Image: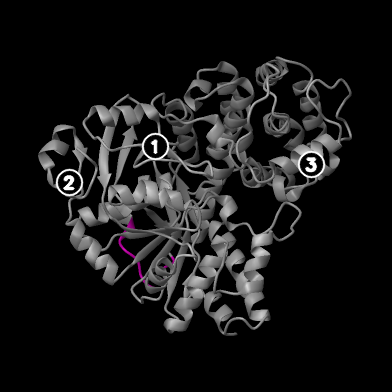
Amino acid sequence: MDLSKTNLKNTEFWDSINVVLPKYDIDKVIANTTANPTWLHVGGGNIFRAFIARINQRLLNQGLADTGIIVCGTQDYENFEKIYKPFDNLTIICDLKSDGNTGYEIIGNITEAVPANYDNEENIKRLNEIVTNPSLQIISFTITEKGYALRDADGKLFAQAVEDMENGPAHPVTCMGFIASALYERFKAGKFPLALVSMDNCSHNGDKLKTSVLEIIGAWTDKGLVDGAFKDYVDDPTLVAFPWTMIDKITPRPSDEILNQLTFLGIDNLKSVKTTTGVYAAPFVNAEVPEYLVVEDLFPNGRPDLAKGGVILTDRDTVDKAERMKVTACLNPLHTALAIFGCLLGFTKISDEMNDEDLKKLVTTMGYNECLPVVCDPKILNPEAFLKEVLEERFPNPFLPDTPQRIATDTSQKLPIRYGITINSYVNDAPEKIPSLKLIPLVIAGWLRYLLAVDDNGNAFELSSDPLAEFFRNELKKAGISFGMTDSVKGKLTSILANETVFGSDLNKAGLTPAIECYLDKLIKETGAVRKTLHEAVAN
């Protein structure tokens, strides 16, 4: 049985393999959404299909909504052609439970999948129809942290950002340029209100989105390329809002094991693909069950009853505390630590790392002793209980095929949030405790060791994609730092550790340089040094 909209009518087959089907009329939802779209999402990856789209599906199942979600993307157009279109935009969600059982649900509420490709006039015409419709309430985003960046580590504008600022709204090439252009169409159509909701794992994500969009709009305004009142429209929170959010759900790349399971159940046309940009995708998503989405309740054009779909709606301050709890302490920095050392030690599954006593002690001790003490309690979630769930249920889940190589992607973009905020909390509020920090400096030294692309056995390995990896590899090379060197690195890291864009703080001024130098000296010394240094650090 192929995965298709027509075949969903064969309910007997799907029931026989325990696949949950949508409880609404898909064709009717498509018609309603086409006429009066309410929700557009940018970024069609796993987290969108496994979580964001599912929130809307829950509302449809309860009769609390009558429109679905339209998805678009500014890159990886292959994803739309190979994963959405052949399967009528359907997705199978595979809930990987820690007891070994798997739950299956088909997501049927993605009504259109439109590449935001300005070389395709029909696509852009359709997207402009969507964004100029007064009914549109939400544009949400899962584009990863780098999707919002207009500048490199030195603060210099990327070439594509310069191109967008010079050329105006007619043919943008960046995602932020696309959003600025879409907002201009909405402005010209009637200054209709809208919420732009970033759902990416970055601190104050709404502000990052707003800042980047307004920088492009500011350049257009200065050059006279747009109406002068346009910037005021986007900068008015009663018309265009950029709420903050905290999102949490682990959605690894598609597993061949899960593909085989689905094929064994009798679903015939499934496949996994790797796009030319290196993204792995499939018409199914394998994901953990725990999920959290905390959203600032700021929607100028109204919103669906998101709370009934599993969203926690609250104020900005509470979102900030929940986000800090998760991103800077109770999950993300621990994930990055496992990613870095997992790659160096040859691991290919996060769950296997949690069976390694040194690695388990690394993230447990760092979480409880170095991160948790400086976290504000958001009240809506208990930090200690959240951390306990991460360490005892989520990371060790052997049925979740997550890899350190995936988590290591874009580490340079993650460090300022995952560690910088915690470091700054100590600098500002408890400077006397900085000398007691042992494991955060170890992870930073571990990342520099990782960038040498030599594992603990002395073998070369491929670094995960990261826009600043080559920059820092060159910086290490210029400093004369290499695997197996016998000289000390003391005094050679000053300029690297002063990079506040990447580390979120000048680590020299923070007082962490001596510890990082000491660890890196040990880590690069010889084969086996990573394991030895890690074991010594967590044993003390």
Give, as a three-letter code, the residue at label 2. Answer: Leu
Q: Circles 1 and 3: CB distance less than 8 Å?
A: no
Q: How crowded is mark 3: few (under 14 residues within 10 Å), some or many (20 or more)?
A: many
Q: Which of 326 and 116 is in front in this view?
A: 116
x and y, in percent, of residue 14 in the image: 16, 38
Side of 45 relative to 110 (left or right)? right
The residue indicated by pointer 1 is 272
x and y, in percent, of residue 17 in the image: 18, 32
Q: Earlier in the sequence, mark 2 or mark 3?
A: 2
Give, as a three-letter code, the residue at label 3. Answer: Leu
Name the image quarter holding residue 285: top left
Q: Circles 2 and 1: CB distance less than 8 Å?
A: no
Q: Residues within 10 Å of mark 2 (few under 14, many from 20)?
A: some
Q: Residue at x 51, y 53 (%)?
A: 143
Q: Residue 160 carries which label?
A: none
Nearest to viewer (mark 2 / mark 3) = 2
Residue 301 in magenta? Answer: yes
Query: What scheme was used to colour the molecule?
Result: one colour
In what element is the residue under mark 1? loop
Q: Give the range drawn in magenta.
A: 298-306
x and y, in percent, of residue 53 in the image: 34, 52
Tell me how far mark 2 sits from mark 3, CA to CA.
55 Å
Side of 262 relative to 248 (left or right)? left
Q: Which mark is residue 497?
A: 3
Q: Circles 2 and 3: CB distance less than 8 Å?
A: no
